[in-house]
Image (tube, helix red, strand yellow):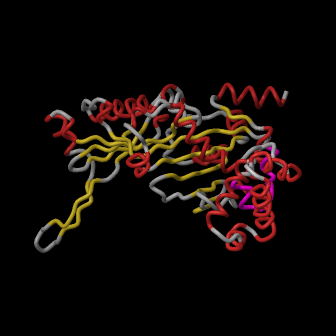
Amino acid sequence: MLIDFITARVELERFSAADQAVLRVHGERIVKFCPTTGAVSWEISTWDSIRSDSHQISVRVTPDCLMVKGSPARVIGDGDAAFSSGAARALDLVGCVQRMARFVGGQLGVTAPEVRLWKVTRTDTTAMLLLPSLADVRAALAILRSCEGGRYRVSQQAGDTVYWSHQSRIKAGKAYAKGPHLRYAMKQRAYQGVSYSVQQLDAVDRCLRLELTHGAQFWRERVEGAWYDVTAEELRAWHGDYFGRMLGAAEVTEMNIEERVKAVADSDGRARAAVGTWALIQAYGWEKAREMSGHRATWYRNLKILRAAGLSDADLSAGNVVAIRRPLIQCQQVESWPQLMTAVYQHAA
């Protein structure tokens, strides 16, 4: 896994007086004013890209704080945004913010405050799943495009990418084909990232990228304690919980659903009710089945049993055990270029 994006901020008062003076004149402003009187209605600072020879990140200076955003992978090691290295690959949130802060401080000529004085307002964590082929990646995406219901809402689709709740300030999901994404990025005139080889691009064509965003409201209201106490294990668990429920247990088949439901239900009556709900979903679809199910509590209790039996939200949305399970059984999570290249080319040999 990888920490792929962070937004963080720190109050200007945490800087020395000299550094505050440097920051207050940094960047451009957009101003609304009356040309007759010269009175200013409002003024807002813009996001500016801070670049070195190979690395980059964006900053914004407001009247009271410095904000930074971007991929920590782009300021760590050689700037590889596919797997990265160091703190980004280790899911070390404190280390990522610290590295970004030092990079910005060095480029602007100021001393960044101690990392615990910063506030994190967004994080993206990603995982890469290796599937048998690019065709299997696209087949998986086709299934995931229909994954709705419960906490998932497909909010946008674009080419080889699916988004869930992309405007949410709590959680948002994203799945996309990493190979085509890298090829597209490298063709852009402004691209300053790593130049990946043909062999690397061919290998990463087989990767499905799953990205989970935790927004400002999540970090403000849903995290117990300070952001800098969040561990790598917690980041992995949050990601696994979000996408695990979407994808379900790979061993589920249409033939063993009733047996699996009986194994997890606490009575024969509740098992029959859950199987009946599954039959309604298969016959009428998610929305109509919910209308026909009667009490809201009964509907959600039956869904809970079906999920405990291994059915995913993709299954429940589609009304059948989706075809994505076969490539998922065969896939593995890859976390480095050596691991990916070995898996792809040794298998091909």
Q: Where is residue 191 in the image (x, y as percent from the top left)?
A: 51, 43
Comparing 296 with 48, the one in front is 296
The question of residue 324 being in magenta is answered with yes
Comparing 66 with 183, the one in front is 66
Comparing 292 with 119, the one in front is 292
Comparing 139 with 28, the one in front is 139
Seen at 80% across and 49% down, the residue is 262
Q: Is residue 199 left or right of residue 279?
A: left
Figure label count = 0
Specify the farthest residue to the left. Answer: 37
Specify the farthest residue to the right. Answer: 255
Q: In this view, does 30 lie to the left or right of 217?
A: left
Query: Is there any visible trace of residue 53 in the rendered image?
Result: no
The answer to whether residue 239 is above or below residue 305 is above
Q: In which quarter of the image is the C terminus?
A: top right
Q: Position of residue 241 (x, y in %)?
A: 60, 44
The answer to whether residue 48 is above or below residue 118 is below
Magenta residues, dominant SS class: helix
Q: In which quarter of the image is the N terminus?
A: top right
The question of residue 165 being in magenta is answered with no
Q: Position of residue 11 (x, y in %)?
A: 24, 42
Q: Image quadrant of residue 147?
A: bottom right
Q: Position of residue 69 (x, y in %)?
A: 40, 44
Query: Is there any visible trace of residue 273 in the rendered image?
Result: yes
The answer to whether residue 22 is above or below residue 60 is above
Q: Give the range drawn in magenta.
A: 313-327
Seen at 69% across and 57% down, the residue is 303
Q: Image quadrant of residue 66?
A: top left
The answer to whether residue 254 is above or below residue 78 is below
Q: Is residue 306 left or right of residue 21?
A: right
